[in-house]
Image (tube, rainbow, N blue to C red):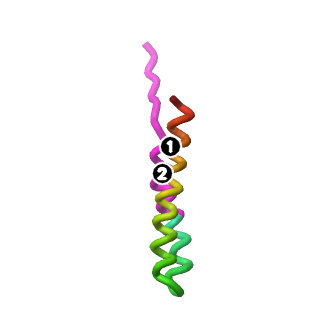
Amino acid sequence: MENKKTEDKSTWAIGGGTLLGLGIGFFFLGGNSHAFVGSLLGGIGAGLITTSIISRKKA
């Protein structure tokens, strides 16, 4: 019997998108706090969209 460990890495896209939005948002933090929040939410949204695309290809 072969042990195949299949890990779903598509959920990592949400965390990666959040960190990307956070990093971009820090550049805007000095000028406009709304741009910081918008970058963070945009990163989360991009991660969610990427996750849905990745999981759809596997099915």
Q: Residue 16 location in percent, x, y?
A: 50, 56
Residue 25: x %, y % from top left: 52, 73
Answer yes or no: do the residues labelled 2 and 1 have beta carbons within 8 Å?
yes
Q: Which amino acid does label 2 sit on?
A: Leu
Residue at 53%, 56% (x, y): give it: 46
Q: Position of residue 45 (x, y in %)?
A: 49, 57
Q: Does dot 2 land on a helix, a strand or a loop? A: helix
**CA separation in Å, label 2 and label 1:** 6 Å
Residue 48 - label: 2
Magenta highlight on residue 43: no
With respect to residue 9, does 22 lie above or below? below
Residue corresponding to mark 1: 52
Residue closest to the eye, 21 or 5: 21
Q: Is residue 54 above or below residue 12?
A: above
Seen as rendered, the residue at the extreme bottom is 31
Q: What stretch is highlighted in magenta?
A: 1-20
Q: Which of 13 and 6 is in front in this view?
A: 13
Q: How crowded is mark 2: few (under 14 residues within 10 Å), some or many (20 or more)?
A: many
Position of 18 relative to 27 (above/below): above
Estimate the x, y position of residue 21 in percent, counting from the top left: 51, 66
